[in-house]
Image (spheres, rainbow, N blue to C red):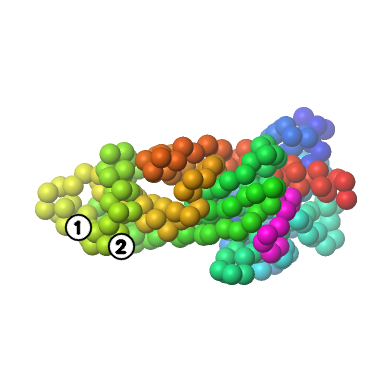
Amino acid sequence: MTADIDWIAADWGTTNLRLWAMSGRRVVERRASDRGMGVLGPDDFAPALAKATEGWPAVPVIASGMVGSRQGWVEAPYAPVPCPATPRMVAVPGDPGGRPVRIVCGIRQDDPADVMRGEETQIAGLLAMTPDFDGIACLPGTHTKWVRISAGEICNFKSLMTGELFGLIAGQSVLRHSVGGQDHDPDAFLAAVSDAMARPERGYGGLFQLRAESLLSGLDPAVARARLSGTLIGWELAAAKPWWLGCDVTIIGAPALSSLYDQALRAQGVPAALMSVEDATLAGLAAAHQQFKTT
């Protein structure tokens, strides 16, 4: 089976490393490691890659994500918008382990200031699978990205810290005692989205109310979690309204989170298309690999 492998795709983030042994566009084998950029020093990347790819042939590696940050293996400079969605790459010197390693560059926006690293590969994948796409890509996550795409270019984008705020509030604030579990109440979620968009001050004033209702009336944790999530996503949709109103939107993200954004957008009359993170990432890395082969 290893004889079929002709390149390796890597999504190397802050906390995790995901690898795919590839034969053209076909996945031969998947692997994952907790050796993300955040736990590695400058001299640790090559050994981490060697261990994670043990048994695979010395074929080219195309990597995206925080591995190309200033604190990563090799800094892959940001390309300024507007720019083609075609991946740009830098080489890791020395072909570690006998493998050429290329890291995809991130994207920058100077006014208003913003950056992305990793999502640009998913956008390249979106365009590889739907070349005529003209609209908005929504990439929900720790820092959700709303990206305007037209004529094969990334025009501009906006980042919102909704996922990180949810994690902090649900995991470290007093509300951690009230929003436990992973259950979700869709009606409570959509009501909170609507309320947050129409009356943002009420949503802010209602955060501690979740704790009080939990103590005084036994508020269901699933309802509390849905109301917190709906409030934060509602605020995000209000802030990002110029990015989705009247636009074609494709959501690229994890299934559960993408479903929440899909529900919230549909409630505003915006039907969104859904694309998996893995599909978009692999299509983008495959486009980068094709560029590597031709240059």
The range drawn in magenta is 79-87
Which one is nearer the viewer's eye here, 109 or 182? 109
Mark positioned earlier in the residue sequence (2 or 1): 2
- Which percent across, then down, holds residue 94? 85, 60
Q: Is there CB contact under 8 Å for labels 2 and 1?
A: no
Q: Would residue 239 be found to the left or right of residue 69 on screen?
A: left
Identify which residue is drawn at 68% across, 59% down.
Answer: 82
Q: Exactly how many numbered labels are in the figure?
A: 2
Quarter in which the N terminus is drawn: top right
User: Is 73 drawn above or below residue 195 in the view shown?
Assistant: below
Around disc 2, counting alpha carbons within 10 Å, would you say few (fewer than 14), some (14 to 19), or many (20 or more)? few
User: Is 268 drawn above or below residue 98 in the view shown?
Assistant: above
Give the labeled residue for mark 1. 209
- Which percent across, then down, holds residue 195? 28, 51
Is residue 54 in view?
Answer: no
Around disc 1, counting alpha carbons within 10 Å, would you say few (fewer than 14), some (14 to 19), or many (20 or more)? some
In the image, is residue 169 part of the stretch drawn in magenta?
no
Q: Amino acid at mark 2?
A: Ser
Give the labeled residue for mark 2. 173
Which one is nearer the viewer's eye here, 131 or 1? 131
Residue at the far left in the pictured view: 216
As measured in the structure, the alpha-carbon distance from the residue carrying label 2 to the one carrying label 1 is 13 Å
Identify which residue is drawn at 39% across, 43% down.
Answer: 268
